[in-house]
């Protein structure tokens, strides 16, 4: 059992509140109101700006060229992911400039700054555990929403979003992130620390669940 | 007009949403439900732990012994302030251990980590502008709630809280903080930067308003 | 006069001790002992690892996607520059693994960690002023050593090194860095702060001069 | 065997180059030229400014009020230690203002910024391992130079310095630091990480030895 699996089991209720959130369920069956998805997507764009900073923080905290290159690849991956958001938002007539002028929601501030602070105050393991619900969680959600593959979703209203996270590139990113957690843990995780990391992981998962909720609340008005 | 006054004017609506929040108004007239105050106070204790880290960050970012000593005094001030909270919470039978076991609310995470990230990513001026709604704002609120002085409040249900922030020690702290903003601005604030700082100040004020709202919601929920 | 020119004039003696160091002069006329160049180059490789971290720090401290992308480009540039070092060191039979096993010299630790600390404790302007002797200074030195262009140096013992820094790509990087200093200064440099930045720039220049000296000392034994 | 003892054994040569340095030996027998001591003491004052920032960094990186209070105590201890330096320097007619105007030596920059960067990029264990040669090493050196107690040294030319570090207050600080290393290691040190920490400890010890050497060189130069 790898470290990610252990974290999920230790924080099972928090994890479930996130990956099994009503937003995810409605997204999957296609009944999610467009207003909810849109509110989410705009905030997720602002979210990714902060997440790219988190990968830059990982590069800064690295000790060797291979570690720096790996973090730089993560940073590039996030910057590419923002292009999906720009493209999807563009269809609703939102320009990148408009995206930037939307105020960050409390839910966006809470999760992103929590992750950045975990990374600034802790070590790379703290940072990657705080990032894990996002990176590895989205891969798990994406895969779960495309049980018959991405091609089968072509008429689904949210096929582009699901395809992004169910797709091979993102799935491979998540595989790499799980392995990275194991490597970092082999270096600096004792059993005594595991409990702290599980608490951190649970908190990050709840903040992700709050982020979905923000989308639903926006549609309810 | 000092920098703090300029910031308040530039972000007047956000500032008003904070200092004129219903929570403050009810606290002042004494109709605030105890459940709201209690929910607030417990979260404010968790808040202060992060704020003491923000003052430590200020000491770390300082260049001279007088600057380091000043930040250390701020850190001590916050640690002392936590004792008011421990004392008040103790009356409701909450031990410090219990206080620590309460999960941080999203509103607490959002404002505290926002401030810490402003300080880590920016300079001392960014950090102190992000702290200003708390340090200087509480002094303003405290003074406003004790128009006839602290002694006149002895039968007020929240006299201890109001007395803390209306009292001379805290008022002097706020005077010092306003002066510090001016000193830091003289060093590194151009007019072009003022707009960014006003946006930061407005955002911090809104996050403070959300923090009051969290207290009210807890009593309604 | 741009900010970089002002910094050079304000710290003229320190700047001259760096760009006019005997190491540079001997490098230019080709009389620099190979042992001195080699000692320098190995340390410069270790230096660049820390400098790539400094660019990652700049990305972490950025606020917008264009700023993050620019810092990421700087990070990529440094990682590419390490390949020149690996190639040149390879000719003397030094593998990348061997390069990593050389202990960092005091001069390497001093300049690199000084820059990183300026960036961590200060703002982006502090960071880029501390980096300027390296980025913009090397461009100036490279250009000065190739007055008739890079092609004219083909028989020069150090043509590859001079060509790297006199070449268009590096010259353009330096042009961009000068412009970035101006942009950052327009945001957060008052005249009162200029004196502090000039002191920082002078100190960084002296630490660069010490770095050349380390190369000469190594050859003297 | 506690973690500190293990680190010393693993980096025995580096440790010995520091605690057994000629500067220490001459200091002990009283033959150290005053010029060497003076050059050292002035730089050590500049050193302590950075070290107080390192303790502030430890407070910022802490998670609980007891941890924050402990780091704050360390910060206070360092600020008090600077007063010994101010007093001793005052005897030679050096005011605090003059002390601040002395340029930092390369050796001072190298060790202090190395420690600060270890702490910023790593976790609290990295930071405290980097600090250990200073905090725990000075206690060991002080004790070794006062084998018959501090009172026996009253005619020794450097009795005040030796008395500071051989005295109970500093010895207790070192005992606390050793225990802290054990606590931090129980949380986040695996055997695989121990090797990295020993390398870090060895490097910090060498940078301390270079610091003594700077004092000797000043007297020779």
Image (cartoon, coloured by chain):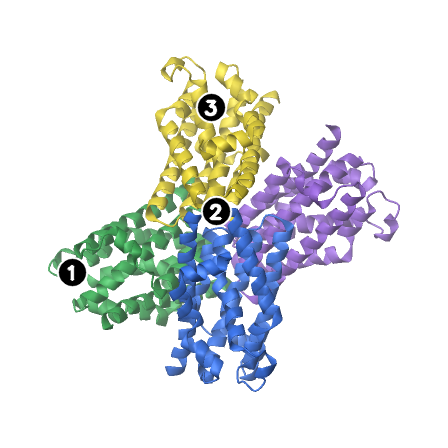
Chain colours: A yellow, B purple, C green, D blue
Residue B90 location in percent, x, y? 78, 44
Residue identified by numbered label 3: A141
Q: CA distance from mark 3 to mark 2?
A: 27 Å
| Residue appearing at x 64%, y 42% in the figure | B205
Residue A48 location in percent, x, y? 46, 35
Please identify the quarter of the rendering in which residue A89 is found. Answer: top left
Residue identified by numbered label 2: A123
Most distant residue in the left direction: C155
**Chain under numbered label 3:** A
Q: CA distance from mark 3 to mark 1?
A: 61 Å
Query: Is C106 situated left or right of A51 in this image?
Result: left
Are callouts 3 and 2 both on one chain? yes
- Secondary element type, mark 1: loop
Residue identified by numbered label 1: C148
Which-is-in-front pick, marks 1 and 2? 2
| Residue appearing at x 44%, y 81% in the figure | D26
**Nearest the camera: D61 or D96?**
D61
């Amino acid at each position: 059992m790898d470290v990610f699996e252990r974290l999920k089991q230790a924080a099972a209720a928090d994890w479930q509140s996130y990956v099994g959130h009503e937003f995810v369920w409605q997204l999957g069956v296609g009944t999610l109101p467009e207003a909810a998805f849109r509110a989410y997507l705009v905030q997720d764009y602002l979210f990714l700006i902060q997440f790219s900073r988190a990968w830059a923080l990982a590069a800064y905290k690295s000790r060797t060229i291979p570690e720096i290159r790996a973090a730089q690849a993560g940073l590039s991956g996030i910057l590419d992911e923002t292009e999906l958001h720009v493209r999807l938002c563009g269809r609703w007539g939102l320009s990148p400039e408009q995206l930037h002028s939307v105020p960050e929601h409390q839910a966006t501030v809470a999760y992103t700054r929590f992750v950045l602070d975990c990374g600034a105050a802790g070590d790379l393991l703290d940072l990657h555990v705080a990032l894990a619900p996002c990176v590895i969680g989205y891969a798990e959600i994406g895969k779960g929403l495309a049980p018959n593959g991405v091609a089968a979703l072509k008429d689904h209203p949210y096929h582009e979003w699901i395809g992004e996270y169910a797709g091979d590139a993102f799935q491979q990113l998540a595989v790499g992130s799980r392995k990275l957690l194991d490597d970092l843990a082999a270096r600096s995780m004792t059993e005594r620390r595991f409990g702290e990391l599980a608490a951190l992981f649970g908190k990050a998962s709840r903040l992700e669940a709050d982020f979905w909720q923000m989308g639903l609340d926006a549609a309810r008005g």
